[in-house]
Image (cartoon, helix red, strand yellow):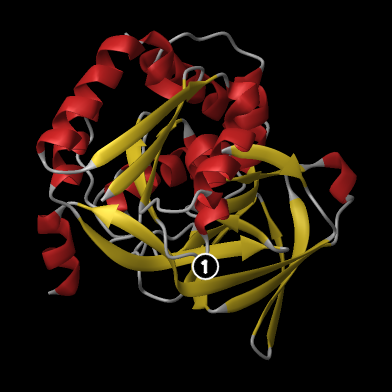
Amino acid sequence: MRFAAVLNRDGGTLRTLDLDSFRDRMRDLLEAAGHSIDIDVVAGKDIVPALDNAASRRGIDVVLAGGGDGTISAAAARLMGKKKALAILPAGTMNLFARGLGIPQTLDAALRSFADGEVMAVDIATANGRPFVHQFSIGMHAKMVQLRQNMEFGSRLGKMRASAKAAWQTIKNPPAMTVTLTIGEAEITARTTGVGVTNNLFGEGHLPFADNPAGGVLGIYVTVARQPAELVKFFFNVARGKWRDNEHVEIHQTERAVLKIRSAARKYRAVLDGELIKLEDEITIEIHPGALNVLVPRHAMRAKAA
């Protein structure tokens, strides 16, 4: 296969990596397996045009994207509905979408898995037409991301510490909003501290990612916890991957949902694949089964097929 790699030197763990040495390892490993690769290392401000170029190039089989959540989400958006496959270098903090695909969590191990990897079709979702691979959320998650952006950190560990601090601040003063959720013919109005809509349902007993990335459904998680003690328990259960028995979460699944914000939307933001975006008054969220080709390790392909 012919690879076009786009590495965001300002994204995720790539910020502290010797990219010249890593680029040489990438080339040696993939070429030894019979592939060819072009590698483009760019600044964060140039990542979108670089991904546009890679996605539009003729003769390319795989776009290999490396960076944080924003880089991976942007790459997936450009490959949605195309024959080209996306290969994900797990350079973010949690790499949740990559985990759901069975991709090893170190950069070199991921590269080795791509050398004999296989292409599979998985789902991608959209919020008002904007693609996402992991989650669209409002409420507590958005507030946490806003708070974290005002903190300084220079490493993955530092970001995790900042996230914990932001979570505690959010627990002490949680946002609350009134929303209406339309699922099929059912309409639900609720006062909530958070709503998350995911690209397939989260699995149980691990970090929040989908066990089946081709399940064909949205997971909708409505947080009903409001008091600090309830929110502490909620976050503790989320960390343990306890969803189905979590008394503070209402779970729904569907192929399409409409979320209407009854509170003043201008007061709030939304998060799409880890990136803060404007929260609109009404959001239509849909799943697009099999609309994204991804390169996964051979063992993961067989496990998903089984």
Residue 35 higher or lower than 122, as above or below? above
- Badge 1 density bin: few <14, some 14–19, many ≥20, Cα 10 Å: some
Residue 214: x, y in percent? 35, 71
Please state which of residues 71 and 222 is positioned toward the viewer in this rendering. 71
**Nearest the camera: 148 or 62?**
62
Q: Which residue is drawn at 37% across and 33% down?
A: 38
Q: Residue at x 17, y 73 (%)?
A: 305
Q: Can residue 11 be seen in this view?
A: no
**Left or right: 101 as drawn, with respect to 146:** left
Residue 57, image x, y percentages:
51, 48
Q: In this view, does 223 lie above or below 180?
A: above
* Residue sitting at x 16%, y 26%: 28
Three-letter amino acid code of the residue under disc 1: Gly
Q: Quadrant of residue 148?
A: top right
Give x and y (percent) for residue 6.
45, 32
Which is more toward the observer, 69 or 206? 69
Query: Can residue 4 be seen?
Result: yes
Farthest residue to the bottom: give it: 185
Q: Where does label 1 land, which residue?
A: 81
Question: In this rendering, would 271 be left or right of 1?
Answer: right
- SS at circle 1: loop
